[in-house]
Amino acid sequence: MATALDIAKHNTNAAPVSVSDSARAPGRDALSRDALSIEKKAEFTVAAAGQSSLVGLTRDELKDKLAAIGVPEREQKMRVAQLWHWIYFRGARDFDEMTNVGKPLRAALKDAYTLARPQVVSEQVSKDGTRKWLIRMASTGPLDKGAEIECVYIPETDRGTLCVSSQVGCTLTCSFCHTGTQRLVRNLTSAEIVAQLIVARDCIGDWPDATPPEGAFVPSDGGRFVSNIVFMGMGEPLYNTDNVVAAIGVLSDNEGLGLSRRRITVSTSGVVPQMERLGAEANTMLAISLHAVRDDLRDVLVPINRKYDIAQLLDACRAYPGLSNARRITFEYVMLKGVNDSDADARELVRLLKGIPAKINLIPFNPWPGSKYECSDWERIERFSEIVFRAGYASPVRTPRGRDILAACGQLKSETEKLRARARMMAEQGIGAEGVYAVGNGG
């Protein structure tokens, strides 16, 4: 029987949490004990399903699937390579497209597996060309209609960036972020993370011999329409490190999806124990959701700061594997009117980052229903940027994209917010109030 997992506190990927007394700011102990205001528990877990899709699987997982249908061990490596090409390079949707795979094996694959993608429940297109998809993952059992996440495609003339989610909901409770107000449902599997790119390429025609939909804004430089991946959607990636690292391995495989690891950026709010592992195993670019230069304020804006304060976070940044002027860390800083946007804040930011190869990405706050914050005035943002720039740091102001469809930074919040546990389901599954399976929202 499946059991609930407290992803935030008992995550098998995370190192044990310990914060010394000397690392705590005065008056922060009481805040640290308020665990529910820092992180959330998962509402349900993944159960075994029926016929499964091969889309999103790693090479080892594909090998296991082939072994399960009787493919001899001596053939498995070759067959994995064939499947890999068709799934990740060609974007095949049907086993019959795999012309270099024998008919008996194709038939066996079709009997046992599918090439199904997650379902696109809705697509919204912004006036600036940004696309947001509400994606429903495959059912994990008879009482699960499929958890939902949001994924955003941001096209430019010379690049296309896909913003992917790593959790259904979010572990954390950042007070300025719409996604942070949503319940945490569960971690996404590595296959579900990879499948977001597959879905995006299906929707914008980013496969060989495919074409983009009429009127779509896609890069015109001759490259792939999705050239960059940012783990900046729903969820805290480093509370799902195993699956994020495995997904990056698939996304960056040169014989398939072929994205450069230098074009993959993982953003974290500061899960310090997992940062070194990310750099060593995934070798991606790193972004830090900083947003404040004082612990007392960051405790409120980014409550994980109560576990890992600014000093600990910046020490982990200095030790990030591969850090150099060519592989700078991006520090994300949302501009909140009258909260964190003073000249003194800008000067302290420069002082804190001394010695770290970095750029500071200033993000005008994107409003969402019910938020208590306002965006800093444009003149204030420019003044803040000027102070940082004069100190020698690149300080671009991120152009808000997709605001009209709530696709901008901090605005993602899927319909899984409506998911509710039902006593009948809990009784049928034999689980208690501490862990539930979720169903769809009936839509």
Image (cartoon, rainbow, N blue to C red):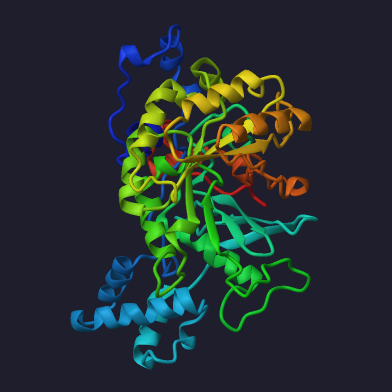
Q: Quadrant of residue 33?
A: top left
Question: Left or right: 68 with respect to 395?
Answer: left
Q: Residue furthest top?
A: 27
Q: Viewer-proximal residue, 4 or 13?
A: 13
Place of residue 1 in the rendered image (x, y in percent of width and height, measured from the top left): 32, 46
Question: Left or right: 320 with respect to 423?
Answer: left
Q: Viewer-proximal residue, 180 or 269?
A: 269
Q: Residue furthest left?
A: 74
Q: Quadrant of residue 44?
A: top left
Would residue 302 be visible to someone looking at this image? no
Q: Viewer-proximal residue, 96 or 340?
A: 340
Residue drawn 66% across the image and 20% down it: 342
Would residue 408 be visible to someone looking at this image? yes
Q: Quadrant of residue 363?
A: top right
Place of residue 81 in the rendered image (x, y in percent of width and height, measured from the top left): 34, 79
Q: Viewer-proximal residue, 263 or 434?
A: 263
Residue drawn 47% across the image and 61% down it: 194
User: Height in image: 311 above or below 78?
Assistant: above
User: Height in image: 262 above or below 12?
Assistant: below
Place of residue 321 in the rendered image (x, y in percent of width and height, measured from the top left): 33, 45
User: Height in image: 31 above or below 12?
Assistant: above
Place of residue 127 in the rendered image (x, y in percent of width and height, measured from the top left): 80, 56
Question: Left or right: 67 with respect to 396?
Answer: left
Residue drawn 37% across the image and 38% down it: 5
> Across the whole image, how many numbered discs are drawn on residues?
0
